[in-house]
């Protein structure tokens, strides 16, 4: 365990983690640390090395080199202590199909040695929290994909671990369940749980993470707060739409006074110029008022995390509403069951 004072060791550290599978450098020197009670979003496209990183940190896979610590325990030298201080919801669902939802939660709770009375209450509470109360006594094999996912999460929370690893927790959830899960996760963080979550959804990282680490081809290609990453992707721009195409040249000239680069789209009567934020925006608004140009719309556009991702990897990330189930199915075939039982 870390020291007792407020400057305790981080809850999770990855220290130059490397994992090679033959010629595949799945993870090639990844380092980061997660302060207690905060959320780290590990962001990256398919095959970036997210799951492999999580599997090493959760002791399911031994690093080729490098190491890590969870709750102060070394993942290579003290795997049992690491497992006691963490919970994991893997990318592939791991519920026992031949047990009911309630039995799945209770089984894991009993393996953790939780007192029965406490377990009964907390199971009810978890079923309620994940909207599984009505289905609690049905066999898990009758559950839909989203219900299994929610049951998986309930199981990983039963022992209230101080550190929780969630590998793409909202993949396969409908938008409502996704937003509900975000709320559950925010509640855990308020109760000082530390979270590492992997995601391909930028919005998810933006919503939940204090800190984002972007990986691609097994390497960290960027890290920082969501705001810092957006800052890196480029400045804000002013977007001006004029009412009449005849005003386009004058408007272009006006925008040039504060920005060397002005992009004009005649068809939509829209001009875009890099800007330093609100200060430039105010200058432009004043100048427009004096110029007599009829303005249809004027706005400030800041880069989104999606722009950041595109900027860094040259690829668009997935959007939240784009459900991709195929890769999930792939993973289920190729990866062994990820159950985290003591
Ligand atoms: N057991 C394994 N044997 C061989 N190669 C593997 C194994 N596990 C992962 N890999 C390879 O390592 C790379 C990283 O895979 P990983 O599952 O960590 O990616 P990911 O970021 O989790 O991707 P996804 O978003 O699709 O889940 C991929 O090229 C993958 O094919
Ligand atoms: Mg993965």
Image: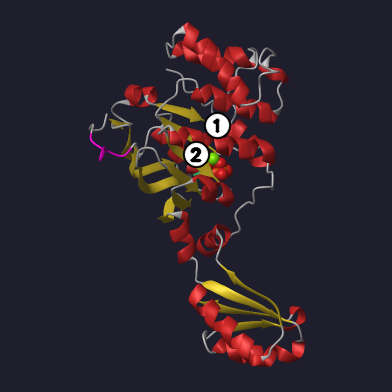
Residue under pointer 2: 51
- Where residue 327 sits, quadrant-wise, is top right
Q: Is residue 41 left or right of residue 46?
A: left
Q: Is residue 108 above or below residue 196?
A: above
Tag 1's secondary structure? Answer: loop
Asked if the residue at label 2 sits under 8 Å from ligand 2, the reply is yes
Question: Mark 2 to mark 1: distance in Å?
Answer: 10 Å
User: Can residue 191 be seen in the rendering of this structure?
Assistant: yes
Q: Is residue 321 left or right of residue 286?
A: right
Q: Is residue 145 above or below residue 47?
A: above
What span is colored magenta in the figure? 5-10
Residue under pointer 1: 335
Q: Residue at left 67%, top 12%?
A: 137
**Ligand 2, image quadrant it occupies:** top right
Asked if the residue at label 1 sits under 8 Å from ligand 1, the reply is yes
Q: Are marks 2 and 1 in contact (CB under 8 Å)?
A: yes
Image quarter where the C terminus lies is: top left
Q: Is residue 205 above or below residue 222?
A: above
- Nearest to the eye among marks 2 and 1: give it: 2
Tag 2's secondary structure? Answer: helix
- Name the foreground residue: 54 vs 251: 251
């Amino acid at each position: 365990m870390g020291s007792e004072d407020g400057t305790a060791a981080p809850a999770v550290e990855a220290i130059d983690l490397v994992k090679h599978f033959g010629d595949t450098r799945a993870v090639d020197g990844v380092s980061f640390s997660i302060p207690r009670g905060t959320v780290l979003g590990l962001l990256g496209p398919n095959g970036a090395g997210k799951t492999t990183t999580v599997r090493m940190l959760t002791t399911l896979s031994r690093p080729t080199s490098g190491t890590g610590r969870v709750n102060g325990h070394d993942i290579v030298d003290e795997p049992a202590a690491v497992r006691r201080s963490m919970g994991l919801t893997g990318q592939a669902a791991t519920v026992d199909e031949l047990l009911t939802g309630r039995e799945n939660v209770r089984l894991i709770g009993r393996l953790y040695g939780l007192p029965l009375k406490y377990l009964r209450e907390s199971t009810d509470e978890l079923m309620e929290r994940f909207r599984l109360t009505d289905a609690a006594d049905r066999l898990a094999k009758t559950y839909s994909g989203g219900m299994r996912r929610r049951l998986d999460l309930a199981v990983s929370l039963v022992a209230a671990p101080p550190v929780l690893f969630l590998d793409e927790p909202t993949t396969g959830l409908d938008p409502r369940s996704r937003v509900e899960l975000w709320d559950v996760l925010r509640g855990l963080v308020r109760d000082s749980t530390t979270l590492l979550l992997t995601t391909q959804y930028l919005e998810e990282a933006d919503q939940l993470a204090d800190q984002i680490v972007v990986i691609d081809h097994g390497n960290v290609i960027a890290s920082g707060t969501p705001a810092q990453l957006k800052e890196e992707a480029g400045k804000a721009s002013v977007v001006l739409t004029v009412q009449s195409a005849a005003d386009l040249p004058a408007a272009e000239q006006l925008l040039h006074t504060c920005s060397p680069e002005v992009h004009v789209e005649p068809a939509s009567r829209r001009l875009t110029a890099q800007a330093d934020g609100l200060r430039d925006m105010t200058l432009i608004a004043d100048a427009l008022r004096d110029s007599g140009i009829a303005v249809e719309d004027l706005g400030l556009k800041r880069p989104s995390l999606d722009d950041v991702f595109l900027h860094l990897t040259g690829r668009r990330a997935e959007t939240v509403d784009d459900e991709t189930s195929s890769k999930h199915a792939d993973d289920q075939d190729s990866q062994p069951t990820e159950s985290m039982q003591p």
